[in-house]
Image: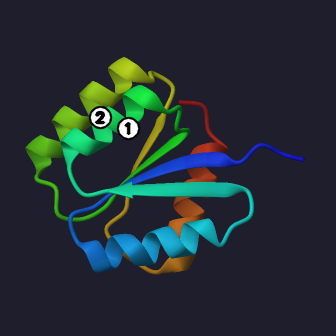
Amino acid sequence: MENRTEILVIGTHEDILQTILRLLNAESLWHAEGVSNCEEAIAKCKSHAYQVILLGGGLTELEEMKLKTEIRLIHPAIHIIPHYGGGSGLLYAEIHGALNTAN
């Protein structure tokens, strides 16, 4: 059995966050969890090894920059992907693309 890719989704819009989690968790080789703010994201990253961080909408540019810096200190090789919509096809392509590239 292959290992599942661990994904953390960060988004401030609860309905959208739940939709993204449902879509990602429908993929058998992915396991996604969600948080709604930067503090929760950093705490999760300190206690769990994610391969992908998906940045959803609602964070400010400054929050995103700080979050990327903090997470890279914890997990330097992690893939951090911005996703602000565009449908499930784009979502899947963004994640597959990141997983197939070295960081």
- Residue 74 falls in which quadrant of the image? top left
Q: How far across and how far down the image is residue 22, in percent?
A: 52, 74
Task: Give the residue pinned by disc 2.
Answer: 42
Residue at 38 percent across and 38 percent down: it is 44
Q: Residue at x 60, y 31 (%)?
A: 102
Q: Amino acid at mark 1?
A: Lys
In the image, is 57 to the left or to the right of 48? Answer: left
> Position of 89 compared to 41: left or right?
right
Tell me if 9 is positioned left or right of 32 in this view: left
Helix, strand or loop for disc 2: helix
- Answer above or below: position of 16 versus 38: below
Seen from the viewer's position, the closer of residues 37 and 72 is 37
> Where residue 54 sits in the image (x, y, percent)?
41, 53
Q: Is residue 70 above or below residue 63?
A: above
Q: Position of residue 81 (x, y in %)?
A: 41, 50
In the picture of the structure, the residue carrying the numbered disc 1 is 44
Between 19 and 44, the one nearer to me in the picture:
44
Contact, CB < 8 Å: mark 2 with mark 1? yes
Query: Within the image, what quadrant is residue 38 found in?
Result: top left
Q: Using residue 64 as the reference point, say whether residue 89 is left or right of it.
A: right
Location of residue 96 by image quarter: bottom right
Q: Distance from label 2 to label 1 (Cα)?
A: 5 Å
Residue type at the position of mark 2? Ile
